[in-house]
Image (cartoon, grey):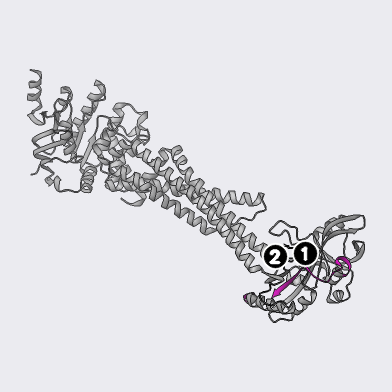
């Protein structure tokens, strides 16, 4: 059986004034249904890793198999189609379209996946129901709190039943209580729906919701352990 | 992605920024309205010039005397006294000539009852009404017998009627005094309006040319001969025949200069319509420039919009928009802006034209083809000036776009 994400020897080098190595050879396997937290200090390469896994960026070297498909062989259009059908993004800054209703924001990935309007509305409402924001469907993002916006963003990431949900510091802009709510929601989605989640965070108590923690340092994986062991290590 | 979805994406983006969209359209609105109005003015000018030329008469040739040299100073055309009524009679016998009327023009005062009026008294033949396509509205034109006997009869233009008979009484049968000579009014001409030069053609009194020569000028020569050619296509041939005939009658041999000039109305008409065509072209090109400026306005705003919406574009790409779809969305936005600007411009332009035509007496003609052309052109402007910003949007790097603040 193939993993959702399988990377081997992943490297990313930025050619600035001098070459900056963001990823120096990363090997990782994420199986279906896993909930993985990626930790590490700033500049450890975790964001670059997320962008490559999210198909927004291409690696300099190494292999990336998504559901067994060689990503390097795909055209930009095929990557865009994969993003709309098989990936869901949740960002730190929510990244909802301004002056666009919550419902339309949730519909967005399906518009690009070519889903007919009726089906689109139904699926969007269902996803909003799942994360408990269906009553906010007509609101504009600027009328909503951070927690509400992030829930709508999660509904958007959910709406196409993706094989992988990528969450990049999803609680970074939220207070403790709201962070807990959002993390409980992600946990529930992972447990009840079996959605594979890859979460980037630098907060241990956020990472604690995951079942496996991968720690990056200087473009390499420093440790890769089940959550209990990993956090014990952090605390000691 | 089908066009309907693309269109609704673009429309939503435009509606989100209503005031900016309207301001962007303004350039195209003004440009298209300017095209519609100027083309309407141009077409109106052409038609009115043609109408005025037609109102001079049908297939008209005008023979006027040439210049004379008096003590070394040459006078202008028309000053010589060389044309006689007999020249006219000879021309009338030429094949291809439908009718001839001499004119003997005298500017003088006419009196009826207690009213007087300074007007142009023209001595003509009865054929004048045919040659000038100018029938009477009441009474009749005087007859050939009146010319033969130099009768004291007159046919009045409507302006003269209004000024001599302000009480509205029927002028026919009444007597008017022209230089103290009593003339009986036998008819009133239909109103013909102004010439292209703004001269009131109805301010005239027609009398037999013999009467004009005998009683007003005391001479034997006429001011001009008006000739109606039977077939418009043979105008040039007839003109040559008249030239030969008059040269023969006036005993002119080369290298002697002709003592007459023949004016062909077709030439005047052609010159006038080419003038108005140039005018039309000039107006239309000024309008086209404003349309292009409107297009540049669209490009400018779209470029600003791409920068401002960088993050939005990044989000769209992250959730799976192909860059071709982003390109098409921005292109459709530009085309929608330009085309709806074009449509509003057509409406505005048409209403302005109608209003201007109602206020001024200048005829204005809105040509349907100019409407179609203006809308198509504005759509083209949208594509042309929308492409570059759309390309910019589509070629953004999604990661950088998402980080953009």
Whether the residues at callouts 2 and 1 have beta carbons within 8 Å, the answer is no
Residue at the outermost front position: B71
A212, above or below B380, in the image: above
Q: Secondary structure at mark 2?
A: helix
Q: Chain of mark 2?
A: B
Q: x%, y% of residue A201?
A: 18, 27
Image check: B259 left or right of A68? right
Residue B223 among those drawn in magenta:
yes
Q: In the image, what residue occupies the spot 73% across and 59% down?
A: B193
Residue B194 among those drawn in magenta:
no
Residue placed most toward the observer, A120 or B224: B224
Among the 4 quarters of the image, the one containing residue B81: bottom right
Q: x%, y% of residue B164?
A: 87, 57
Number of the front mark, 2 or 1: 2
What range of the chain is rendered magenta?
Answer: B214-233
Among the 4 quarters of the image, the one containing residue B133: bottom right
Q: x%, y% of residue A108?
A: 30, 41
Crowd tier of the residue under label 1, counting other residues whose Cα lies within 10 Å: few below 14, some 14–19, many 20 or above: some
Residue at the outermost top position: A236
Q: x%, y% of residue A16?
A: 18, 34
Give the mark nearest the N terminus, 2 or 1. 2
Residue placed most toward the observer, B101 or A13: B101
The circle on residue B190 is: 1
């Amino acid at each position: 059986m193939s993993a959702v994400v399988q990377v081997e020897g992943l490297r990313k080098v930025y050619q600035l004034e001098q070459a900056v190595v963001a990823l120096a050879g990363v090997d990782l396997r994420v199986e279906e249904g896993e909930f993985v937290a990626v930790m590490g200090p700033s500049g450890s390469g975790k964001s670059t890793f997320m962008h490559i896994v999210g198909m927004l960026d291409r690696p300099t070297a190494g292999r990336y198999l998504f559901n067994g498909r060689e990503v390097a062989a795909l055209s930009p259009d095929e990557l865009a189609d994969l993003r709309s059908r098989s990936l869901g993004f949740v960002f730190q800054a929510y990244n909802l379209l301004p002056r666009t209703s919550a419902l339309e924001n949730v519909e967005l990935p399906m518009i690009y996946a070519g889903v007919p309007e009726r089906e689109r509305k139904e699926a969007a409402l269902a996803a909003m129901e799942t994360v408990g924001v269906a009553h906010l469907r007509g609101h504009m993002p600027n009328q909503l709190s951070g927690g509400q916006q992030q829930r709508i963003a999660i509904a958007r990431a959910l709406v196409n039943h993706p094989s992988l949900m990528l969450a990049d510091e999803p609680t970074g802009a939220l207070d403790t209580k709201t962070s807990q709510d959002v993390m409980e929601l992600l946990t529930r989605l992972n447990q009840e729906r079996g959605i594979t989640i890859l979460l980037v965070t630098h907060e241990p108590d956020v990472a604690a919701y995951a079942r496996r923690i991968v720690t990056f340092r200087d473009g390499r994986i420093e440790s890769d352990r089940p959550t209990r062991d990993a956090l014990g290590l952090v605390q000691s | 992605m089908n066009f309907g979805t693309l269109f609704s994406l673009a429309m939503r983006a435009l509606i989100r920024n209503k005031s900016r969209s309207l301001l962007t359209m303004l350039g195209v609105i003004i440009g298209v309205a300017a095209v519609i109005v100027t083309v309407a003015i141009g077409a109106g000018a052409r038609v009115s010039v043609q109408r005025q030329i037609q109102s001079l008469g049908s297939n008209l040739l005008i023979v006027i005397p040439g210049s004379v040299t008096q003590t070394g100073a040459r006078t202008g055309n028309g000053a010589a006294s060389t044309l006689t009524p007999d020249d006219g009679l000879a021309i009338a016998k030429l094949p291809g000539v439908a009718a001839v009327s001499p004119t003997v023009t005298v500017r003088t005062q006419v009196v009826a009852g207690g009213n007087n009026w300074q007007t142009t008294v023209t001595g003509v033949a009865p054929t004048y009404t045919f040659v000038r396509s100018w029938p009477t509205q009441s009474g009749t034109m005087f007859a050939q017998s009146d010319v033969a006997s130099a009768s004291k009869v007159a046919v009045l233009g409507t302006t003269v009627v209004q000024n001599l008979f302000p009480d509205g009484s029927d002028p026919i049968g009444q007597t008017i005094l022209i230089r103290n000579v009593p003339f009986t009014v036998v008819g009133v001409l239909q109103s013909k309006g102004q010439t292209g030069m703004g001269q009131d053609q109805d301010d005239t009194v027609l009398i037999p040319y013999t009467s004009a020569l005998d009683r007003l000028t005391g001479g034997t020569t006429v001011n001009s001969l008006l000739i109606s050619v039977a077939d418009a296509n043979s105008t040039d041939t007839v003109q040559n025949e008249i030239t030969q005939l008059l040269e023969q009658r006036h005993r002119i041999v080369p290298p002697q200069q002709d003592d007459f000039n023949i004016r062909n109305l077709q030439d005047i008409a052609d010159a006038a319509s080419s003038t108005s065509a140039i005018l039309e072209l000039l107006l239309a090109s000024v309008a086209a420039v404003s349309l292009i400026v409107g297009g540049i306005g669209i490009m400018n705003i779209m470029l600003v919009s791409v920068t401002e919406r960088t993050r939005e574009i990044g989000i769209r790409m992250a959730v799976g928009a192909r860059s071709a779809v982003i390109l098409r969305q921005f292109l459709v936005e530009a085309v929608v802006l330009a085309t709806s600007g074009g449509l509003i411009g057509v409406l505005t332009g048409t209403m302005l034209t109608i209003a201007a035509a109602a206020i001024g007496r200048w005829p204005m003609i809105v040509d349907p083809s100019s409407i179609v052309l203006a809308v198509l052109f504005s759509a083209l402007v949208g594509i042309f000036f929308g492409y570059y910003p759309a390309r910019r949007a589509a070629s953004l790097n999604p990661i950088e776009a998402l980080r953009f603040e």
